Amino acid sequence: MLAPSAYNSQPWQFRIVGGALELHADATRARPIADPLGREMFLACGAALENVRIALRHLGRNVEIAILPDHARPKLVARVRVGTPRAATLTEARFFTAIPLRRSNRARFYGRPLPFGVAPSIEQAVEGTGAALRFVSPATTRDALAQIIHEADRAQAYDPEFRAELAAWLRPNHTDRPDGMPGFAFGLSTPMAALAPLALRAFAWDRMRVVCDDELAREAPLVGVLLTQRDEPRDWIAAGQGMERALLFATSQGIATGVMNQAIQVPEARERVRRLMGTDMQPLAILRFGFGTDAQPTPRRGLRDVLVRSQRG
Ligand SMILES: Cc1cc2nc3c(=O)[nH]c(=O)nc-3n(C[C@H](O)[C@H](O)[C@H](O)COP(=O)(O)O)c2cc1C
């Protein structure tokens, strides 16, 4: 439930079926304009799946995971079975502790560089998931990436359908709603946050953000692109698992993280990111790492809303 998801849409549902835990993508929480193929929906589910795995390992169990989406049951992400006892390692315990501490940070990071050796460790945290993280060098390709993000941001800002969909997931700063993004997550004051959905429906919002993402991408000490070999639901799930591991590892080191995916959501921009990275692999997320002020937690749905006990099986 604490995993990151685009627009804080939390597009997952857990079902206990027989002795297994099934994870399903919840298509009622899809974002058809920004994410027509469901890539980011499966990414979020992959992140939630990784949290399940880490939690069970923390509880001292082996974990058997079958990644499942197929033509017959396209929304069934995975089936998880609790295996035999095996003590958690220190690294696994650290990942677990980081789950409730992880935040998406949208503020400027300080200029302070990351400690030596941290970037390769973040890269390593992703290994074995089926995804790979490649860093974008500030010396060579960072400006070009920031430019692509800027253009993708503008393309979305001038698309009324995109804006209406995003507006539906924006929330006031004080809200009882268990999903969506309160204005404080973007650094908005309480009055600005209350007005934001209305303003967004009416105008291109590119001046509304306190800091624009291209600037954040340009300035961050470390920016990485998460890549997979192919572009199928299984790859999207793997990317979600890899993304969560990178974010949790960084969190465990006291490093702030953020996701900036407009250049993944706009098809032409995504192709440009792929070429910029000089790869045949598929870009699925752009991640930012650094030191900054603390971000507040965003709301989550309750267990009753996401967990279903099924008679089947
Ligand atoms: C696939 C994916 C794409 C995301 N894209 C963006 C983005 O483009 N810009 C942004 O500010 N946050 C982005 N996020 C972060 C979510 O908005 C964030 O996870 C959600 O609001 C919940 O907040 P939390 O991560 O602090 O728990 C993305 C997250 C995921 C999983």
Image: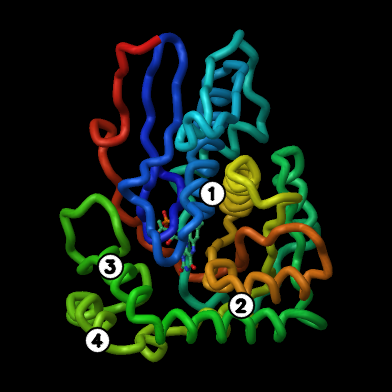
As drawn, the label of residue 212 is none
Badge 4 local density, few (<14 within 10 Å), some, or many (20+)? few
Badge 1 local density, few (<14 within 10 Å), some, or many (20+)? many
Q: Kindly identify the amino acid type of the residue bearing the numbered disc 3.
A: Leu
Which percent across, then down, holds residue 206? 41, 88
The picture quadrant where one finds residue 22 is top left
Task: From the image, tell me which residue sits under label 1.
Answer: 43
Helix, strand, or loop for circle 1?
A: helix
Q: Earlier in the sequence, mark 3 or mark 2?
A: 3
x 64%, y 86%: residue: 147
Using the numbered discs, state the Cα–Cα distance from disc 3 to disc 1 in whole angstroms.
21 Å
x 41%, y 44%: residue: 2
Task: From the image, tell me which residue sits under label 2.
Answer: 217
Using the numbered discs, state the Cα–Cα distance from disc 3 to disc 2 in whole angstroms.
23 Å
Which percent across, then down, holds residue 71? 53, 34
Task: From the image, tell me which residue sits under label 3.
Answer: 170
Task: From the image, tell me which residue sits under label 4.
Answer: 202
